[in-house]
Amino acid sequence: MTGANGQVGQALQATAPFGWTVVAFDRSTMDLTDPQAIRNAILSEVPDVVFNAGAYTAVDKAEKDQELARKVNGDAPGVISETLSQAGGRLVQISTDFVFDGSRGTPYLVDTKPNPLSIYGATKLLGEKQAGDDAIICRTSWVYGASGQNFVRTMLRLFRERESVSVVSDQVGVPTWSRGLAKTLWALALEDRPGLFHYQDAGVASWYDFAFAVQEEALKLGLLSEAISIYPITTSQFPTLATRPPFSVLDTTETQALTGQSPTHWRENLRKMLKEEKGLG
């Protein structure tokens, strides 16, 4: 797998089924901007499955750093796929809800036509295309995990540092715990059926709802000593370089049918993640 030190990469390693040998590469051992480094790593290991958990995920920075985002998110999956056509094995490519523009008011089906609003979304969509028809492609959303760089841990820091915070309330999606995502990715790999899939936790939320829940659950666990005010604001009140979809709920029906696994509600998984975070000190 690529992205060994990222939150999805760590979760994949922690949830590996019994009997599998996992060889995890990070940026220092497999540079995703270097096609030859990718080829060398795959041809030396001849893997049954490659989980491409490495990605350029700095959504706003990608608007300025377009070439790097394209190499990592768009070109690297093509190199992996091409090399696997020689070595054998299946690519599991992780994609994003940001391939959609958020103009719908109902969950996005796997065959809904994408229309990304950002460079990040566009490069991830390119990665889907480059991965090819033999790949397992799984779109997900709002991923977070213990010890990683994500919304939950950012909110915990801000809750400790500030007297109040303002959080966007008109962007709706689904928070997804990296452990739940990793288990589904393994299940898809074990089914070994190429195609496009969606996975996220159950339920829906705005970023404001998510932040409110983070504070409430963290207070119960003693991760925070006191509550602060959280104010809802609109996207227009919090301008960013990248445009984000206002609605990015994904339809996970096909994934559930194939794997036999139903997603857990995001609030329950948030509690599990915060307990893990507390255990890490």
Image (cartoon, rainbow, N blue to C red):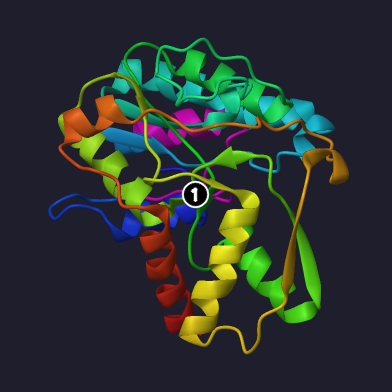
In the rendered structure, which amino acid carries the disc numbered 1?
Pro
Residue 126 location (% of width, % of height): 58, 17
Q: Nearer the viewer, residue 67 or 99?
A: 99
**In the rendered image of this protein, does residue 263 appear above or below residue 96?**
below
Residue 16 location (% of width, % of height): 25, 53
Q: Nearer the viewer, residue 30 or 240?
A: 240
Q: Nearer the viewer, residue 102 or 46?
A: 102
**In the rendered image of this protein, does residue 267 appear above or below residue 126?**
below
**In the rendered image of this protein, does residue 137 appear above or below residue 23?**
above
Q: Quadrant of residue 63?
A: top right
At 77% from the left and 27% from the top, the residue drawn is: 66
**In the rendered image of this protein, does residue 267 appear above or below residue 218?**
above
Within the magenta stretch, is there residue 30?
Answer: yes
Secondary structure of the residue carrying tag 1 is: loop
Q: Nearer the viewer, residue 273 or 15?
A: 273
Residue 184 location (% of width, % of height): 28, 42
Question: What span is colored magenta in the figure?
Answer: 23-43
* Left or right relative to 246: residue 8: left
Q: Quadrant of the N terminus?
A: top left
At 26% from the left and 42% from the top, the residue drawn is: 186
Label 1 crowd (10 A; few <14 / some 14-19 / many >=20): many
At 54% from the left and 22% from the top, the residue drawn is: 127
* Left or right relative to 10: residue 230: right
Q: Is residue 130 in view?
A: yes
Within the magenta stretch, is there residue 201?
Answer: no
For disc 1, the marked residue is 175
Tally of numbered tags: 1
Q: Is residue 149 in view?
A: no
* Left or right relative to 23: residue 212: right
At 47% from the left and 44% from the top, the residue drawn is: 204
